């Protein structure tokens, strides 16, 4: 209601200013709820999305069938359909799924349900979102306190599964007397893989039984990285608009 009164249709000239009607509206919410401006703007964006794009989902939130945190997931994962003619049908289908399952929704189950619905109604939008996401893949580093730093990368889900399996395979090659935690070994294994250096067992024993592969042979020669993709024959052949799944990731 505040959004309707203060922002209106969002086409007024002052919307070009740094402090526009939206920011003014969010500031009032921030004051009323004792939250930050950013948090209030997020609340307002989600409220407007429920009002304009997902009114039936909003009813389920009002009725207590789903939590605010889960509704945030629905809003985010249907955002690519904003302005599309199928949005009302997607809203209705998601609401119907919520009605069928009255219990608590896990994050993974809800995510997959939404993605399936979105894909059925506008697969081209999903493919375009995927293309943009792939184009935005990157590697980044971030300094951390105490002489530490963080390195991360975004890439296709299947590539992450393969890379993670390679790191875990190398990290597990040490003997039982290596005192590092699993997380520490994974960090050291990842450095070894990225830098092309040899990964070592740190047990310090002369009779160490670890079989550490050479840098160029990780994962070990006889190991296989298997990615399970579940889909129907029509999806595999490209004749059906049904989503497939990657094990441990979700809809693709």
Image (spheres, rainbow, N blue to C red):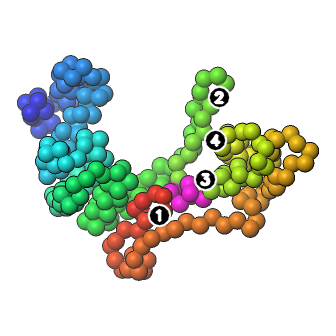
Element under disc 1: strand
Q: Nearer the viewer, mark 4 or mark 1?
A: 4
In terms of sequence position, does the residue under pointer 1 or pointer 2 come before the other?
2
Q: Are marks 1 and 2 in contact (CB under 8 Å)?
A: no
Q: Calculate the distance from the C-alpha at mark 2 to the C-alpha at mark 4.
A: 15 Å
Disc sitting over residue 183 in the figure:
4
Which residue in the protein does label 3 denote? 164
Q: Calculate the distance from the C-alpha at mark 1 to the C-alpha at mark 2.
A: 33 Å
Q: In which quarter of the image is residue 226?
A: bottom right
Determine if residue 148 is in view.
Answer: yes
Query: Would residue 29 be counted in the magenta stretch?
Result: no
Residue at 64% of width from left, 41% of height from top? 183
Foreground residue among 59 and 4: 59
Establish if 241 lies above or below 20. Answer: below
Which residue in the protein does label 1 denote? 246
Dot 2: within a 10 Å radius of its alpha carbon, few (fewer than 14), some, or many (20 or more) residues?
few
Segment colored magenta: 156-162
Can you give x and y, in whole percent of width and height, for residue 238 in the image? 40, 77
Q: In which quarter of the image is residue 6?
A: top left
Disc sitting over residue 148 in the figure:
2
Is residue 100 left or right of 4 when viewed as pictured?
right
In terms of sequence position, does the residue under pointer 1 or pointer 3 come before the other?
3
- Quadrant where the C terminus lies? bottom left
In terms of sequence position, does the residue under pointer 2 or pointer 4 come before the other?
2
Foreground residue among 10 and 46: 46
Can you give x and y, in whole percent of width and height, for residue 128 in the image? 37, 59
Dot 3: within a 10 Å radius of its alpha carbon, few (fewer than 14), some, or many (20 or more) residues?
some
Element under disc 3: helix
Is residue 231 left or right of 184 when viewed as pictured?
left
């Amino acid at each position: 209601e505040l959004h309707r009164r203060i922002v209106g249709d969002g086409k007024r000239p002052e919307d070009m200013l740094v402090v526009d009607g939206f920011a003014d509206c969010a500031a009032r919410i921030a004051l009323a709820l004792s939250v930050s401006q950013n948090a209030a703007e997020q609340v307002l964006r989600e409220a407007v999305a429920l009002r304009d794009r997902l009114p039936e989902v909003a009813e389920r939130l009002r009725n207590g069938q789903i939590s605010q945190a889960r509704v945030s997931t629905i809003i985010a994962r249907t955002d690519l359909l904003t302005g599309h003619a199928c949005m009302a049908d997607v809203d209705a289908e998601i609401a119907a799924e919520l009605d069928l399952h009255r219990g608590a929704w896990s994050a993974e189950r809800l995510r997959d349900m939404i993605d399936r619905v979105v894909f059925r109604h506008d697969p081209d939008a999903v493919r375009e979102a995927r293309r943009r996401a792939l184009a935005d893949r990157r590697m980044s580093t971030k300094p951390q306190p105490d002489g530490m730093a963080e390195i991360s990368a975004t890439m296709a889900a299947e590539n992450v599964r393969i890379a993670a399996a390679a790191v875990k395979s190398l990290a597990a090659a040490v003997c039982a007397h290596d005192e590092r935690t699993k997380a520490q070994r994974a960090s050291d294994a990842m450095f070894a893989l990225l830098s092309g250096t040899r990964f070592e067992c740190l047990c310090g024993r002369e009779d160490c039984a670890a079989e550490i592969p050479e840098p160029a042979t990780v994962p070990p020669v006889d190991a296989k990285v298997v990615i399970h993709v579940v889909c129907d024959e029509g999806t595999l052949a490209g004749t059906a608009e049904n989503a497939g799944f990657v094990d441990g990731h979700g809809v693709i």
